[in-house]
Amino acid sequence: MNNVNFVGQALKNLFSKPATLNYPFEKREFPEGTRGHVENDMDVCILCGLCQMKCPTGAITVDKKAQTWAIRPFSCIQCRCCVDNCPKKSLSMDKMYQEPGPEKTERVLDLSDKQKEVLAAQAKAAAEKAAAAKAAMEAKKKAEAAAAAGGAGNPS
Amino acid sequence: MSSRSVIPFGPQHPVLPEPIHLDLVLEDERVVEAVPSIGFVHRGLESLVSKKDFKEMVYVAERICGICSFGHGFGYCDAVEHIMDIHVTERTDYLRTILFELSRMHSHILWMGLMADAFGFENLFMDTWRIREKVLDMLEAATGGRVIFSILDVGGLRRDVPDDMLKSFLPVLDDIEKELAIDIKTFLNDSAVKSRLCGVGILTPEQVETLGCCGPFLRGSGVKRDSRKLGYAAYDDIDFEIITSNDCDTYGRTFVRAYEILQSIKIIRQAISKVPSGEVMVPVKGFPQGEHMTRLEQPRGEACYYVKANGTRFLERMRVRTPTFANIPALTETLQGCDMADVPILIVAIDPCISCTER
Ligand code: SF4
Ligand code: SF4
């Protein structure tokens, strides 16, 4: 008998614990850093659009006007590129794999109210700053023009 | 004179999850001719280079095939790194070698399961795949993905694999080695298995050379050729022998693959004991300009990556010669004159990866 070896193994397999998990009663423990699916913290996102630009499959859409961030989970290839490029670290990779579904839907996330206020305040401050800079620029130009006119009309 | 009949094999066939179609011309139970046709899963990935940034292309290259994902990503990155004259760090080289060998293990163990399934030994099939799960767990811990690793990048690796994690792989490898030894013994010594493998699909060393075979298929006919000996990544620092078999049949190919798994374990142990500390990424500036051809040994055989760049974000051309493509002529050769019942075994023997071949 030259397959005695495997008979032993087969018997062992027959009487030992199953190699598979008893799902759904037993859940799998994923190792650290498993790429499951992408999550976005809408309290932190600034809608900069970098993730949309970097995503190789074009799964992410950032709408600045509507203040939403959307992902098409069935286009996402779990490459983690967006997560690595997010400047605010608002994106993260959840360990659980993407839920299956009957339709290729899009998941749209609204910016949180708190973050909307923060962004509005930032935009307002930026606009004020820009206006102030513009005004300063114009004043400077005017002064220069006046100085030039004064110089021209003042023969020495 | 017996009459001829044509039996279609595939594109959907229980022995192979991938779509290849063969027209088998039979005379009684004997195959007299086999006409392959492929093209069921062509995705045009090579032409994507003109639409994707050369760094984004890494993700595409990795997804050419599920099983040799690491090999494809590596081939692409290596070619681009050569063009841009980037020298990756030594740690990167070692980690790439370790991951490459782990993926070779998972591919070969997968193949052994498929082979056991093809000759109808379901118990052996399940046992090999149970062992493969441990390899996949290691890969998942190291890279974050079970089959698509997304860890490679032009210039290095996207994440480091810490030393203590590498050390924790060692006992698992010991376990795998012990458990695999039993399965390998069954593959190589069991009389029932041998009766299905020995003398099936004989190709002489001259034949495999002229048909342009590669990988374990070539080495199973006694030709000592392995692209790892070219010394890319850290392979030039690693001591290993090319495994060949002089059986020149399916048994020889099984022998080569079985011992290559054990050899991969030894290579990983060596690499883990030598891996230096340091960074895993070097900065990449500018765009590639020039062309390069990389040859590397994937689990299924030698793959060639040709990349041509024109100094912009987009590459001009990428071409992949996959090992299965090189082995298909030999497959049709072995199918001629074989028994109908041996067809699945002969097809599985080349370890066909049709998605790779069609890209
Ligand atoms: S990169 Fe980050 S902060 Fe910017 S839009 Fe995407 S998720 Fe928001
Ligand atoms: S993980 Fe990759 S594919 Fe998915 S959304 Fe992020 S960048 Fe796009």
Image (spheres, grey):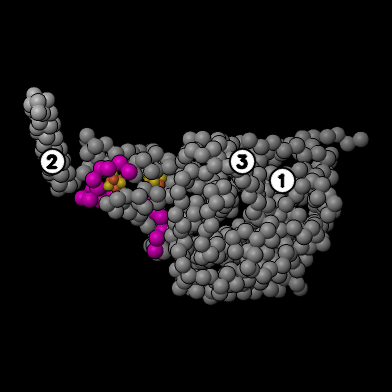
B88 in relation to B16, above or below: below
Q: Which residues are magenta?
A: A32-50
State the CA–CA distance, disc 2 to disc 1: 65 Å
State the residue lying farthest toward the top: A153
Q: In the picture, which quadrant includes the N terminus of chain B?
A: top right
Q: Residue at x 88, y 36 (%)?
A: B2
Residue sitting at x 15%, y 41%: A126
Which numbered marker is on residue A129? 2
Residue A12 visible in the shown view: no
Q: What is the number of the mark on residue B319?
A: 3
Residue at 46% x, 58% y: name it.
Answer: B281
Name the spot of residue B20 as percent of width and height, x first.
Answer: 66, 41
Q: Confirm if mark 3 falls within 8 A of ligand 2.
A: no
Residue type pointed to by label 1: Ala
* Place of residue B257 in the rendered image (x, y in percent of width and height, measured from the top left): 69, 61
Q: Count of labels shown?
A: 3
Q: Are marks 3 and 2 in contact (CB under 8 Å)?
A: no
> CA gap, disc 3 to disc 2?
52 Å
Task: Describe the element under mark 2 as helix, strand or loop.
Answer: helix
Which quadrant of the rendered structure holds the C terminus of chain B?
A: top right
Which-is-in-front pick, marks 1 and 3? 3
What amino acid is at disc 2? Lys
The image quadrant of residue B103 is bottom right
Placement of B117 over or under A49, stated as above or below: below
